[in-house]
Amino acid sequence: MQQQLLFDGSSRARCPISTATRHARIGVFRHRLDGSRQALATAPAQDAHLLIVQLKEHAPHDLWVDGQHLPAPQVGRGALAILDLRRETRALLSAEVDSLHVHLPRPALDDLAAEAGAPPVTSFSTGKEWTSGDLIAQQLSTLLAPVVDDPNQVAQAYLDHVVLALASHIAATYGAMRPRETRPGGLAPWQLKRAQDMLASDPTNDVSLHDVADTCGLSVSYFSRAFKVATGTTPHTWLQSCRVNHARGLLLDQSLPLAEIAQRSGFADQSHFTRVFRQSMGSTPGAWRRLKRER
């Protein structure tokens, strides 16, 4: 009997196609057996899900999930299933197999949800063990299947685009990944998050508004208007608020001079720091610090 280990969940695992999200990688491979001998495919318990899309008709087989026997039915080409790999899974396969597997680690799903401005995907539901009729999943899988054996025949950007499109479609369709509502004329949730992350990443870094707008795929003028619609304030004012909040944390250290706090918080000098802090907090940094000390 042939033994196959599918996605052991370790950093050593390798896939022909691997697409990066912010904190993880989505792996894709084509699972093929000629049916000449039995094969036992196993996946150790891990915090991930496995999308399986059948590229041809798939015969009935035996499946065990956490030791429980769950006979799997015959399914047609294009049928898909999503396995929860948090439960140890084994499949005994005796017939020909040709399917596309997409490994979706928890951090990758969290990244997709964050980009979409949606809550994290906690589970998937296809309505039944195998589902068919998902034309989008079928078409995207058809684009990936021919290049799995030799991904170098196409550009990595193409692979990333298709893999992320498939993963996002699965998360939205079967994991209820729904973006939060966007105010008309504002930024999409992923654009707002990306912009705020860039602006707040380092208070001493005078990030270019052009760079932030470009990252969001927008012109500077449109981005500035849309940011104000989404947040109620301009990017510059929002950044100054972040710097004030950073300075408040530093002010709790009574040993730090105000000039040093101004510099470490991204202000031009102590005078600039004092002026912006008073506008935001209603008192000077020194008075605010004394009030906190007295408490």
Image (cartoon, rainbow, N blue to C red):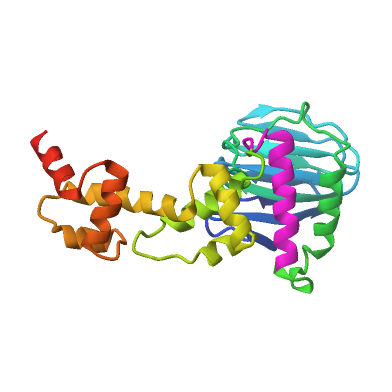
Instruction: Specify whether residue 205 is painted magenta.
Output: no
Point out the image quarter for the C terminus: top left
Q: Left or right? Give the position of 191 relative to 135.
A: left
Q: Find residue 65 and report its image quarter.
A: top right
Q: Which residues are magenta?
A: 157-181
Residue depicted at x 43% and y 50%: 238
Q: Is residue 24 above or below residue 282?
A: below
Image coordinates for residue 36, horizontal then vertical, percent: 85, 52
Residue depicted at x 64% and y 60%: 218
Q: Nearer the viewer, residue 60 or 255?
A: 255
Whether residue 8 is visible, yes or no, is: no
Q: Left or right? Give the position of 145 relative to 156.
A: right
Residue depicted at x 26% and y 52%: 247
Q: Left or right? Give the position of 200 relative to 139.
A: left
Q: Nearer the viewer, residue 268 or 254?
A: 268
Q: Is residue 261 above or below residue 71?
A: below
Whether residue 236 is visible, yes or no, is: yes
Image coordinates for residue 187, horizontal then vertical, percent: 61, 47
Is the stretch drawn in magenta largely helix, strand or loop?
A: helix
Q: Nearer the viewer, residue 5 or 132?
A: 132
Image coordinates for residue 171, horizontal then vertical, percent: 68, 40
Instruction: Specify whether residue 163 is painted magenta.
Output: yes
Residue depicted at x 70% and y 68%: 156
Q: Is residue 139 above or below residue 121?
A: below
